[in-house]
Amino acid sequence: SATATTVDKPPSGFLQLAYSAAGLATTAAWSTMVYTTIRSNQPLGAMMPCWQHGFYARIGAMSAAPLIIGSFASLAAAASKADSWEQLGTPSCNRHNLALTTAGVGSALWVAFAPLVTKIPGTTPLVSHQSYKGAMRAGLIGCYGSAAALGAAVWARSLPDHIRHNPLLWPGHVVDGVSKSLVSLAPQNVDDPVQVKYALLTGSFLVFTGMQTLCNMPISVIPSWTSRRLSRAFPAWTLLGAVTSFDLKEATESGRLLVDENYRYLSNGIKGFGTLYLG
């Protein structure tokens, strides 16, 4: 019926605006963390070897920005064209909403516990590379938290009805999706260089995410090269890079890569990451 159609139709304009705002806020929050954490005398007496050290470390860390912008732009574009919640529940949208939710929660926790995460070993009392307080701390957590809440809300609302109405099924649904993606990492056609490229990028980003999250120093600084300053914050964005690369691999395999403009945003995000990181 007309009433049912109206109720089931997502607020496309609002969601497009919300994704755009969340993307800007997340990029601004990450930029603030990079600028305020990678610098000499942070803490007092922790000097950079030379000015080039901090300069290039910041550029490398800011390589996450194109990934963030590309992911939010892709979701905003999808929301602008969605006539039903089902169209926002595609595997690509689901993966990016969950990845941004994970990145947002992880980044907010990093801000909250920065004094412990960036602690300099052997210092008594505690000395850390970063410790946010007051309005700055609240603002950063708010930026990351709102982006995470948006991604989680859209993901949950776009689930099939029989799953959406039973939250106990949500963890199993996520595990099923992750498992399906993991067994699909290899390219369908090893003779297609584009498929192989995105498959290798996906695997590399996943390995880097695991190294930064699970390994101790000095292994955990790869690939951010930011020592204890941001090495535990960067895996949020290498995870997003893995999801972006996997989506591009699937789009290549299905022939949608050059047809759907959403993938252009994701592709530009990967290119931007590579340009800044290698530059």
Image (cartoon, rainbow, N blue to C red):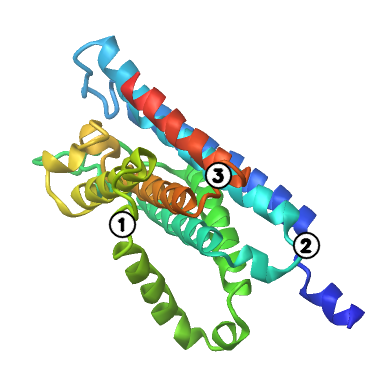
- Could you tell me which quadrant the N terminus lies in? bottom right
- Residue at 29%, 11% (x, y): give it: 51
Residue 48 coordinates in the image, percent (x, y): 23, 18
Q: Quadrant of the C terminus?
A: top left
User: In the rendered structure, which amino acid carries the disc numbered 2?
Assistant: Pro
SS class of the residue under badge 3?
A: helix
C-beta proximity under 8 Å, tags 3 and 2: no
Number of callouts in the render?
3
Q: CA distance from mark 3 to mark 1?
A: 18 Å
As displayed, is residue 266 above or below residue 144? above
Q: Which residue is the site of mark 3?
A: 263
Task: Tell me the residue at 26%/40% (across/down).
Answer: 231
Decide if residue 29 is in sight here: no
Mark 3 neighbour density, 10 Å: few (under 14) some (14–19) many (20 or more): many
Residue type, label 3: Tyr
For this orientation, the residue located farthest to the right is 2
Task: Look at the numbered disc 1 and give the secondary structure of its residue.
Answer: loop
Label ID, residue 55: none
Q: Which residue is mark 1?
A: 185
Residue 264 vs 101, above or below: the answer is: above
Residue occupied by mark 2? 11
Residue furthest front as drawn: 191
Instruction: Name which residue lies at 28% across and 44% down.
Output: 200
Q: State the image coordinates of residue 196 (x, y, percent, origin top left).
A: 31, 44
Q: Alpha carbon of mark 2 to alpha carbon of mark 1: how far?
A: 34 Å
Residue visible at 77% across and 64% down in the picture: 83
Relative side of 177 to 264, left or right = left
Relative image position of residue 188 (x, y in whole percent): 34, 55
